[in-house]
Image: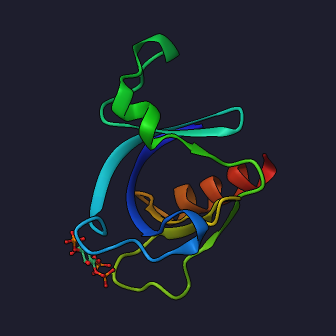
């Protein structure tokens, strides 16, 4: 699965709140492949073309949990992703359908 997603980092590893200055929204092209959600700066790229920054933004979603972000109302179509290392991301999809599709696909892994 792939598509445009905006990301906001809410908590870092071990669940510590992401500090100010790194809490902004950023738009990515997301690609879910195997157990990894790649958040790429530009459009679709094959593995070989991923740059260092793209690899840094990749999120392991094994044992991660995706839910509708019911407690976040500033933007529509936002899901909350909790990873196994206690990071928390908010991810905004272009539509309700896309958001639910990401939730479903992430939780299938
Ligand atoms: C953050 C940025 C985010 C905002 C966040 C700010 O500043 O303005 O858009 O979240 O508020 O801290 P910075 O880019 O300097 O990290 P919202 O869009 O959800 O308001 P927050 O600290 O309340 O999460």
* Image location (x, y in percent) of residue 77: 46, 69
Q: Nearer the viewer, residue 5 or 83?
A: 83
Q: Nearer the viewer, residue 85 or 71?
A: 85
Q: Nearer the viewer, residue 87 or 5?
A: 87
* Image location (x, y in percent) of residue 93: 44, 58
Assign ligand 1 to one image quadrant. bottom left
Viewed as shown, does residue 79 lie left or right of 66?
A: left
Q: Is residue 78 above or below residue 53?
A: below
Viewed as shown, does residue 3 lie left or right of 63?
A: left
Color theme of the render: rainbow
* Image location (x, y in percent) of residue 88: 54, 68
- Residue drawn where x is 56% and y is 70% of the image: 80
Q: Residue furthest top?
A: 48
What is the quadrant of the N terminus in the image?
A: top right
Q: Is residue 107 above or below residue 75?
A: above
Q: Is residue 52 above or below residue 36?
A: above
Q: Quadrant of residue 26?
A: bottom left
* Image location (x, y in percent) of residue 74: 34, 83
Q: Quadrant of residue 84?
A: bottom right
Q: Residue furthest left?
A: 21
- Residue drawn where x is 75% and y is 48% of the image: 62
- What is the tally of numbered marks visible in this picture? 0
């Amino acid at each position: 699965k792939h598509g445009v997603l905006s990301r906001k980092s809410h908590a870092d590893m071990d669940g510590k709140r992401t500090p100010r200055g790194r809490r902004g929204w950023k738009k990515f092209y997301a690609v879910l492949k195997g157990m990894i959600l790649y958040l790429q700066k530009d459009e679709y790229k094959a593995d070989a073309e991923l740059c260092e920054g793209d690899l840094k933004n990749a999120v392991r979603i094994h044992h991660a949990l995706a839910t509708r972000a019911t407690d976040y109302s500033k933007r529509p179509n936002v899901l909350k992703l909790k990873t196994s290392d206690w990071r928390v991301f908010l991810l905004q999809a272009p539509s309700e359908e896309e958001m639910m599709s990401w939730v479903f696909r992430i939780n299938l892994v």
